[in-house]
Image (spheres, rainbow, N blue to C red):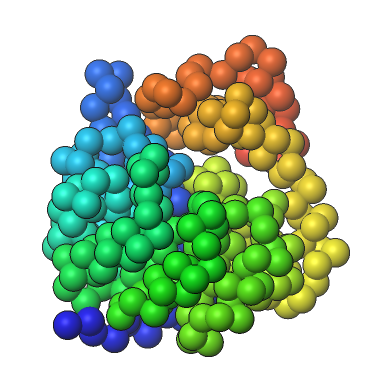
């Protein structure tokens, strides 16, 4: 049976969903304790939700056992200060196991990664999400849609599954998002899933809030951008986004393969080393990328980065 989601989670969902990195030690083992300063900074800055096992957390580079350990560790370190979302996905067996682990860890909700299988049937995705929802035993479900090619009919069916309360829309198609919103239950919360840079156009057609990997490095900037958009101040939001555009451009290099690499390299420059990025992500940064990153962080006034630059 699907229970009602906790009010604090529903009120937080239109905010910032911060996607946490997964730290590794020198032996390529997950090292959750290194994440504590990142979590504390994000909570103190006002980030509304924190997510374990998202794409910035290298979800597809983790074993299921590692992902289970991460959601438990994140929930323990957050300690109820903000809602925690547990990312689930891959094979249906993995997704079910992670849903159960997230429930046991005390997560407030599940984020279901869109299956990357090359043979995905729209109705198969519906069945997949239903199985995950059952395994979650009442936890609210947030869909993570990176590919709207499954069609608006399937998206409408997904939103109608009991327990689905929100959608993180990560397709650069605002008009298609507007149509999906029109078809769905008005209670469904649509969140911009393409981080700060795409937040203004997605907000303009009905999304509320956005996902963010920047919160690992500069949570205050993400919170300021969210506040500007919530107030309808698009010029201010765009100006704030322009300030961190060089950072996001670096993350988009190498076919988006430096997305997590830039975040982890920035954390190292700030004195909060969370280790390397696992293949197939790019690691380490090239000399050019590292120089540009240090210059950007120095401009932002982050002390350790200023010394490095």
The image shows a total of numbered marks equal to 0
In-image side of 195 versus 10 (left or right): right
Q: Quadrant of the C terminus?
A: top right
x, y (%) of residue 83? Answer: 36, 68
State which quadrant residue 26 falls in.
top left
What percent of the width, then of the height, locates residue 187? Answer: 48, 86
Q: Work out whether 90 lies above or below 238.
A: above
Tell me residue 301's x, y (percent).
Answer: 69, 40
Which residue corresponds to the image point at 38% horizontal and 25% vertical from the top-left? Answer: 278
**What residue is shown at x 58% (from left), y 77% (from top)?**
181
- Residue with the most extreme right position: 235
Q: Residue at x 35, y 63 (%)?
A: 123
In this rendering, position of residue 88 left or right of residue 66: right
Q: Which x, y percent locates residue 292?
A: 71, 24
Residue 138 in sight from this viewpoint: yes
Residue 130 or 170: which is nearer the viewer?
Answer: 130
Q: Relative to the observer, which residue lies in front, 18 or 134? A: 134
On-image quarter of the N terminus: bottom left
Kindly tell me whether residue 304 is visible in this rendering.
no
In this view of the protein, which residue sits in the foreground, 162 or 203?
Answer: 162
**Above or below — where is 64 with respect to 206?**
above
The furthest residue to the top: 287
- Residue at 24% x, 27% y is 29
């Amino acid at each position: 049976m699907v229970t009602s989601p906790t009010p604090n989670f529903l009120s937080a969902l239109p905010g910032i969903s911060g996607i946490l990195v997964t730290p590794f030690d020198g032996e390529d083992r997950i090292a959750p304790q290194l994440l504590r300063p990142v979590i504390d900074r994000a909570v103190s800055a006002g980030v509304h939700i924190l997510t374990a096992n998202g794409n910035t957390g290298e979800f597809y580079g983790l074993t299921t056992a590692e992902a289970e350990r991460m959601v438990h560790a994140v929930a323990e370190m957050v300690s109820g200060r903000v809602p925690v979302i547990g990312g689930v996905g891959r094979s249906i067996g993995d997704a079910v196991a992670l849903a159960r682990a997230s429930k046991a860890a005390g997560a407030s909700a599940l984020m279901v990664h869109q299956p990357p299988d090359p043979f995905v049937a729209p109705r198969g995705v519906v069945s997949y999400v239903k199985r995950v929802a059952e395994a979650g035993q009442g936890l609210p479900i947030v869909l993570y849609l990176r590919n709207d090619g499954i069609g608006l009919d399937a998206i409408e069916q997904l939103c109608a599954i009991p327990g689905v309360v929100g959608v993180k829309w990560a397709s650069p198609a605002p008009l298609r998002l507007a149509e999906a919103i029109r078809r769905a239950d008005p209670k469904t919360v649509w969140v911009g899933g393409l981080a700060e840079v795409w937040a203004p156009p997605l907000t303009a057609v009905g999304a509320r809030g956005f996902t963010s990997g920047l919160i690992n490095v500069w949570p205050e900037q993400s919170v300021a951008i969210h506040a500007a958009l919530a107030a309808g101040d698009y010029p201010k939001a765009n100006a704030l986004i322009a300030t961190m555009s060089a950072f996001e451009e670096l993350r988009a290099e190498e076919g988006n393969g430096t997305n997590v690499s830039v975040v982890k390299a920035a954390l190292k420059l700030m004195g909060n080393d969370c280790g390397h990025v696992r293949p197939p992500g790019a690691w380490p940064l090239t000399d050019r990328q590292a120089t540009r990153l240090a210059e950007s962080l120095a401009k932002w006034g982050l002390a350790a980065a200023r010394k490095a630059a």
